[in-house]
Amino acid sequence: MARRSLAWQTFAVAATYIGTVVGAGFASGQETLRFFAAYGRAGLLGIALATVMFCAYGSLILGLGRRLGARSHSEILRHVCGEHLGRVMDALITLFVGATLAVMVAGGGAVFTEQLGIPRPVGVLITAMVTGATVLAGMRGIVAANAVVVPVLTLTVAGLTFSSINFHGLLPMLTRALPWPGLAPVKSWFVATLLYAGYNLVLSIPVLGPLGAEVEDRRALWLGALLGGTALGILGAGIKLAVGAHLPEIGRWEVPMLYLARLHSRPVQWIYTAILWAEIYTTALGCAYGFAVRTAEVLRIHYRTVVVAVTAGALVGSGFGFSRLVAVLYPVFGFVTLIVLVGLTWVGLRSQSAP
């Protein structure tokens, strides 16, 4: 990253962090619906815990990326999990990053279908092609895309949330927040939070690790993690309240936030549709970049060739459907990532106790 002011570097780190996490699942409301709103009022406790985890582990991952000079997620995984387990986790996470790209592409198709009435294959194709073209530019293209998209998405989500709170009233939204077990991935809100934070944090390693190695001022790493993690928590709480106020009918939508947008004027619907798709696109960038860099290293294939191949693979994988992929793939991977969280926790505690 070129020499910039501390404020700019902090903003770039925070925006890239948010953009990596806030993808199809988050910005659509599908993740928040299943992992938090489904647990009623307890979901807010989950969001508070997830916010703390995003701030703490985000800073740790960025710091490790800087210290190890990470070029991909493999250096960090081997450092926190050991050589042999690190290799296994490296392979699993690389595969899941590629699978998550398919989720993002499917989410892009769902947005085109539910809001614009455009056939899903067209939306899927557009999302995949734009993602692949940007990733060919490397990390610089990802940072630039997030610097533009993330602030606009944050303001728009906040607007929809405050509009819902103003309409329903904050107290009624809190008191009427009943659990909907049929939408929950597991019985416990605490376990659901660990799974949610786990897979999002591990998915961010392929981007945050190399980013930490490129940022010049180390202060920007923990400041950016604090800002990004806090913003993710505020956005998550807002979406949880807004989505939860419209259960159970909103649970039938592939993109719950579009349900909220349709309660507003036509211009608001179009604006949120465009921004939602843009945020899906920024997370797809992180997934495609992480998968392409690591695969190119392991197989010694040219980076551009891998980008084209993974984009084509995402087109095929998106055929499983957006909400089905979120409901099945994310919880399963969440359990796998708990191993990495334990390793990160141990490394973090060890560094704090070192003289």
Image (cartoon, rainbow, N blue to C red):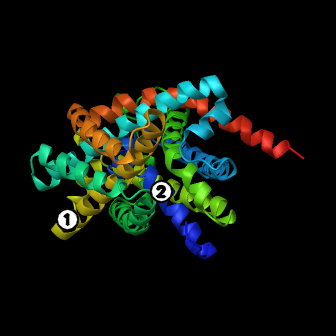
Give above or below for 3 relative to 328. below
Return the disc, 1 or 2, that comes first in the chain's sequence: 2
Viewer-proximal residue among 110 and 254 = 110
Q: Is residue 177 visible?
A: no
- Identified by mark 2, the residue type is Ile
Q: Quadrant of residue 144?
A: bottom left
Give SS at disc 1: helix
Q: Would you say 130 lies left or right of 227 here? A: left
Total marks in image: 2
- Identified by mark 1, the residue type is Trp
Viewer-proximal residue among 354 and 257 = 354
Please state which of the two labelled residues, at mark 1 or mark 2, is closer to the viewer.
Answer: 2
Give above or below for 259 relative to 94. below
Q: Which residue is mark 1?
A: 270
Looking at the figure, which quarter contains the N terminus? Answer: bottom right
Q: Is residue 150 visible?
A: yes
